[in-house]
Amino acid sequence: MDENTVTDAVLEQMSSTENPRLKEILAAAVRHLHAFAREVDLTPEEWIAGIGFLTAVGQKCSPIRQEFILLSDTLGLSSVVNSLNDKRVLREIPPQSQDTKSSLLGPFYRHGSPAFEYGQSVAAKTPAAEIAYYGRVQDSSGQGIANATIQVWQTDEGGMYDTQRHDGSEMDMRGTFHTDSEGRYCLRTVRPLSYSVPMDGPVGDMIRAQRRHGMRPAHTHFLISAPGYRELVTALYMSSDEYIDSDTVFGVTSSLATEPKSGDHSSPFPSLPSVRYDFVLVVAAKDAASGRVGADPSQFIKHPVEAAH
Ligand code: BEZ
Ligand code: FE
């Protein structure tokens, strides 16, 4: 057995895997992992440092923190999976006009955000730099989709998510809206700021070692769903942001870059800088799985009684 022949030996032993997809994924993982170790001539010290790093990533996870997703995001893996999923979905459905591009769910999504009415603000405080988002949720023929659910979340005026400010018991700067009978939506919020991905864990150590800035351009997240349509996970980015071309997690696509405009008389709030954006949902493929590349971090943490078993 040497560093080359061991690869075939492992693949041979795993060849009895019953589930064909599991077999394919693990075989490819083993081939690439072994090739990676051979390519860099991995030493025992480097191997154990890698084990220590992944252990620390796991230990940093909590009901309000998913360090593994952050690792996937900062290595660009989440963006690869997102793009693959967008392409797969478009292969499975009949050709439709351009749908809205997806973007990362990120680690700060939470289930069950408070419900708001058309035009309300998600900001608990009303600071000076208020903006409005408005437009329609529509299908690929331009028909409005009534009663679509729109979940939004973003940082506050100081550039932090609620889970970074509190212990997770309070929700702020996030909310759930519904479109009206014509598919229209409107919400107010504060102008988002660029912010740093969480740097107080092992992923932050990695980012610093790589001399990366760790910043994300300012954005507001949108998760939009309606029965019969593919769920859309996306975000709208501030195009004037200094980090628009160097997002640490590779989430920006040009069609998602926007800028609030003053004096927009079509806005339901003409006195506020407003972004008009129409989101296009595509009809869901039969039995389509969720396209979310990300999850509420609490979903991975076992209840203490469950964990004890
Ligand atoms: C976010 O936009 O919330 C985010 C996404 C990926 C990593 C960190 C933050
Ligand atoms: Fe974000």
Image (tube, rainbow, N blue to C red):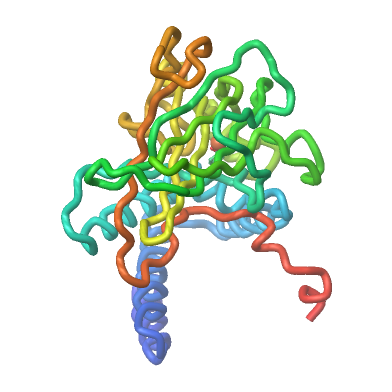
**Can residue 9 be seen in the rendering of this structure?**
yes
Q: Residue at x 78, y 41 (%)?
A: 170
**Can residue 211 be seen in the rendering of this structure?**
no
Which image quadrant: the C terminus?
bottom right
Q: Is residue 148 above or below residue 43?
A: above
Q: Is residue 211 above or below residue 128?
A: below
Q: Residue at x 42, y 36 (%)?
A: 184
Q: Is residue 201 above or below residue 210?
A: below
Q: Residue at x 57, y 23 (%)?
A: 192
Tell me where residue 165 sits by quadrant: top right
Horizontal side of residue 23 vs 218, given as left or right: left
Most foreground residue, 43 or 211: 211
What x and y, as percent, mark residue 257? 38, 26
How many numbered markers are drawn? 0
Residue extending furthest toward the front: 181
Image quadrant, ligand 1: top right
What x and y, as percent, mark residue 189? 59, 25
Most foreground residue, 213 or 81: 81
Which image quadrant: the N terminus?
bottom left
Horizontal side of residue 303 vs 143, given as left or right: right
Horizontal side of residue 176 vs 301, given as left or right: left
What x and y, as percent, mark residue 147? 47, 49
What x and y, as percent, mark residue 247? 45, 30
Q: Is residue 211 above or below residue 20?
A: above
Q: Residue at x 35, y 83 (%)?
A: 20
Residue extending furthest toward the top: 263
